[in-house]
Image: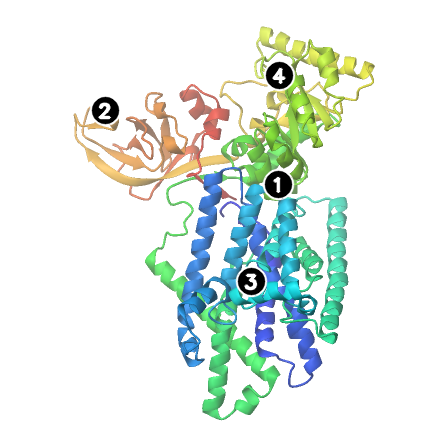
């Protein structure tokens, strides 16, 4: 399973189908033959939740992916627009015969009207959604890159209010001469305000807000205790009550709009915003497995249902049953619905068959190089570490550098489910990514963040490390309240105010805009059991304790304290602080193969690294391979080219270090220089290696294994560096 596939968005996926049915109802008026008022309720009020829901889904999944890398953001926007544009253009082409039949290309047709319809209105009544969502996303993207997400939402809300005056509350605009002229100009450009400028942005932003503030952590509730379960149940009930309440108010609003003849189009209601907020949260609270089939089915039903309406009507004429299949609105609705779903299912089945024929390996996550992340081992390590932590000490999971190459938000998400609610990252961007992926709890930035980004610290509820008194002054001068931890340098000589500067340290707790949540230091030799290093570490701990005692004597509460990292816990677990920052041990390895620790603990490696054999070649004696011929065959032999290189994180000196990999359970020497995208392995004594076979760089293959500690040691480095170097091209597979 790929990263993020374990997400539980089944509530959203299921409602996509319900929404598609409501769209069909909106275009077929199923109750009109029985009760016009009931049909109005269904088609002009109840069904108005559908399009906002689709917009919110887009905002929820798109906006949460925005990060601090501008180029990546632009590329993501570009890919989104291309994908939607292709579907939109295909839909336009499908319905050209319908346009011709309906007289679209008549005297009123012009290049201007065509451009207007393609960009805003849609060339058929339901196709306006595609330009609407594309334009809406562009507006929201621009707002989010220039403003905080809250400010962006407020501007989108203002656009929606303007749109209301051109839709359900048009009578108010007509009562004012200036407003009426403004809207006449608007309607010269667009058919209505139900478009990507006035309608879409507020719901796209609402979905983005829900994602940004991490109201929900999706997924199977692993080891959820009774308190957590009851809390989740209360939230679900709260969202259900909120939805029922505001849905009732929205219905009332719709009836009042009808009663007083206020509307021009009946597409937009003011109370649909809180109504949709609670509905979306309610759907997110259901931990139902995601269903891609339902997701795609809903999209296809939306696109194809007008064609099915035409087919049903045509069939009625041909068979002489128009009075039954069209005249009876409910039967008409049911036939269109069944045909729409049948046609959509057929298209999906056909597309799947074509996809299989054209590329059987297109969706294979293990096509080149990949890392298998064993979440069961991660859970085991959490239990083991918690077992050896001092009483009252909580784990702060260090997930910086993409969780040491394991996938930052994916690991944090799983840890959230295991009850871990304290995280440490290195940069602002890493912290924002966690929040956008819905990670709950405290997120401490261990590194430096420029004061110009303080609004992002506040908006994403991130906790910033204060490295010295000058930095504290700069942060406080920004007049934005943020949570911080104070760092004290007790002997590492890196970040932190020196332990000798008691008065400076004390002053850092008095800045009005800095809400101090903790105080910490870092032990720089806790991994060593050499006597000088032990003495140095104990001296660091003593210095920290002395600073804390001095602060308390001055009436200052240092809040939560944390000193130990992984080795600090394993070698000095007699120390008792509020948190322990666990990094490398969480992932089941130590920094070096030869490292010894005082505390007995059973850790299991979380990551295995594998790559494909992409070519097998015969090599004659005396032939050189690789850049500059760094390896020359001393006899006739055979080599395998493996699809992983230094751009994926493999050190270039693997061959010099006499490192190896595993193929079919046998160790094979890595030879020649490691290339950017490949490395070369000697398989001279193996006859059964073929293209597509798997090479294991880290992990187990039959009776053989290569640990991360072994590979790091051969390259004269530590596992922390080796694992953190694994690049984005290495697919993460979580199992």
Image coords of residue 244 (percent x, y): 75, 63
Image coords of residue 499 (percent x, y): 68, 11
| Residue sitting nearer the eye, 76 or 530 | 76
Discs 3/2, front = 3
Residue at the (68%, 67%) spot, across then down? 169
Q: What numbered label is drawn on residue 588?
A: none
Q: CA distance from mark 1 to mark 4?
A: 28 Å
Query: Seen from this angle, which residue lies furthest top?
Result: 532
Q: CA distance from mark 4 to mark 3?
A: 58 Å
Image coords of residue 369 (percent x, y): 39, 39
* CA neighbours of label 3 inside 10 A, class few (<14), some (14 to 19), many (20+): many
- The residue at which mark 1 appears reads as 435
In this picture, is 217 found above or below 238?
above
SS category of the residue bearing label 3: loop
Discs 2/1, front = 1
- The residue at which mark 4 appears reads as 523
Numbered-mark total: 4
Taking the image as shown, residue 338 lies to the left or right of residue 574, namely left
SS category of the residue bearing label 4: loop
In this picture, is 329 found above or below 561?
below
SS category of the residue bearing label 2: helix
* CA neighbours of label 4 inside 10 A, class few (<14), some (14 to 19), many (20+): many
Whichever of callouts 4 and 2 sits on the residue coming sooner in the sequence is 4
Discs 1/4, front = 1
Q: CA distance from mark 2 to mark 1?
A: 47 Å
Query: Seen from this angle, which residue lies furthest front?
Result: 177
- The residue at which mark 2 appears reads as 628
- The residue at which mark 3 appears reads as 195
**In the figure, residue 645 lies in which quadrant?**
top left
SS category of the residue bearing label 1: helix
Q: CA distance from mark 3 to mark 1?
A: 30 Å
């Amino acid at each position: 399973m790929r990263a993020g596939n374990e997400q539980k968005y089944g509530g959203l996926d299921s409602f996509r189908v319900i929404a598609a049915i409501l769209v069909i109802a909106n275009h077929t008026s199923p109750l009109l033959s029985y009760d016009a008022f009931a049909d109005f309720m269904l088609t002009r009020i109840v069904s108005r939740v559908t399009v906002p829901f689709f917009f919110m889904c887009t905002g929820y999944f798109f906006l949460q992916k925005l990060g601090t890398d501008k180029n990546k953001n632009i590329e993501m926007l570009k890919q989104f627009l291309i994908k939607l544009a292709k579907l939109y253009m295909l839909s336009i082409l499908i319905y050209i015969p319908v346009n011709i039949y309906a007289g679209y290309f008549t005297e009123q047709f012009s290049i201007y009207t065509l451009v207007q319809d393609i960009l805003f209105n849609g060339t058929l009544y339901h196709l306006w959604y595609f330009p609407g969502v594309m334009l809406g996303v562009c507006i929201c993207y621009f707002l989010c890159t220039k403003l905080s997400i809250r400010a962006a939402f407020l501007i989108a809300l203002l656009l929606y209010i303007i749109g209301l005056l051109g839709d359900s509350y048009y009578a108010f605009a007509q009562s004012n001469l200036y407003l009426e002229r403004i809207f006449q100009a608007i309607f010269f450009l667009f058919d209505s305000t139900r478009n990507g400028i006035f309608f879409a942005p507020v719901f796209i932003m609402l979905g983005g807000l829900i994602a940004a503030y991490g109201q929900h952590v999706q997924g199977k509730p692993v080891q959820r205790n009774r308190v957590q379960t009851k809390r989740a149940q209360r939230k679900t009930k709260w969202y259900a009550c909120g939805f029922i309440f505001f849905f009732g108010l929205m219905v009332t609003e719709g009836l009042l709009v009808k009663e007083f003849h206020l509307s021009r189009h009946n597409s937009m209601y003011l109370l649909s915003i809180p109504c949709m907020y609670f509905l979306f949260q309610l759907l997110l609270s259901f931990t139902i497995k995601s269903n891609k089939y339902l997701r795609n089915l809903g999209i296809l039903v939306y696109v194809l249902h007008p064609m099915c309406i035409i087919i049903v009507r045509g069939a009625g004429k041909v068979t002489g049953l128009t009075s039954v299949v069209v005249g009876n609105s409910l039967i008409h609705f049911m036939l269109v619905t069944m045909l729409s779903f049948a046609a959509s299912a057929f298209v999906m089945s056909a597309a799947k068959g074509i996809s299989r024929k054209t590329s059987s390996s297109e969706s294979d996550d293990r096509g080149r190089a990949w890392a298998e992340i064993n979440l069961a081992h991660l859970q085991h390590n959490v239990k083991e570490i918690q077992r050896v932590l001092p009483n009252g000490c909580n784990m702060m999971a260090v997930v910086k550098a993409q969780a040491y190459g394991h996938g930052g938000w994916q690991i944090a998400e799983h840890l959230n489910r295991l009850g871990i609610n304290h995280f440490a990252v290195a940069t602002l961007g890493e912290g924002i990514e966690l929040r956008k992926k819905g990670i709950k709890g405290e997120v401490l930035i261990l590194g430096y963040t420029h004061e110009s980004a303080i609004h992002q610290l506040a908006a994403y509820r991130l906790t910033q490390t204060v490295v010295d008194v000058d930095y504290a002054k700069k942060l406080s001068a920004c007049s934005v309240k943020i949570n911080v931890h104070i760092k004290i340098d007790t002997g590492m000589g890196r970040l932190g105010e020196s332990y000798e500067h008691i008065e400076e340290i004390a002053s850092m707790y008095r800045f009005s805009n800095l809400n101090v949540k903790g105080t910490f230091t870092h032990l720089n030799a806790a991994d060593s059991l050499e006597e000088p290093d032990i003495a140095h570490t104990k001296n660091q701990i003593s210095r920290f304790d002395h600073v804390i005692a001095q602060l308390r004597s001055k009436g200052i509460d240092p809040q939560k304290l944390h000193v130990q990292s992984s080795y600090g816990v394993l070698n000095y677990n007699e120390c008792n602080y509020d948190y322990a920052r666990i990094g490398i041990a969480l992932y089941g390895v130590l920094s070096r193969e030869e490292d010894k620790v005082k505390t007995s603990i059973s850790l299991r490696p979380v990551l295995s690294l594998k790559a494909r054999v992409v070519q097998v070649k015969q090599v004659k004696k005396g032939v050189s391979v690789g850049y500059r011929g760094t390896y020359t065959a001393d006899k006739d032999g055979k080599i395998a080219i493996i699809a992983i290189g230094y751009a994926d994180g493999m050190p270039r000196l693997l061959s010099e270090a006499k490192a190896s990999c595993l193929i079919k359970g046998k160790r094979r020497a890595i030879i020649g220089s490691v290339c950017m995208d490949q490395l070369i392995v000697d398989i001279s004594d193996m006859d059964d290696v073929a293209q597509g076979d798997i090479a294991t760089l880290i992990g187990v293959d039959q009776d053989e294994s290569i640990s991360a500690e072994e590979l790091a040691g051969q390259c004269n480095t530590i596992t922390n560096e080796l694992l953190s170097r694994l690049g984005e091209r290495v697919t993460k597979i979580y199992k």
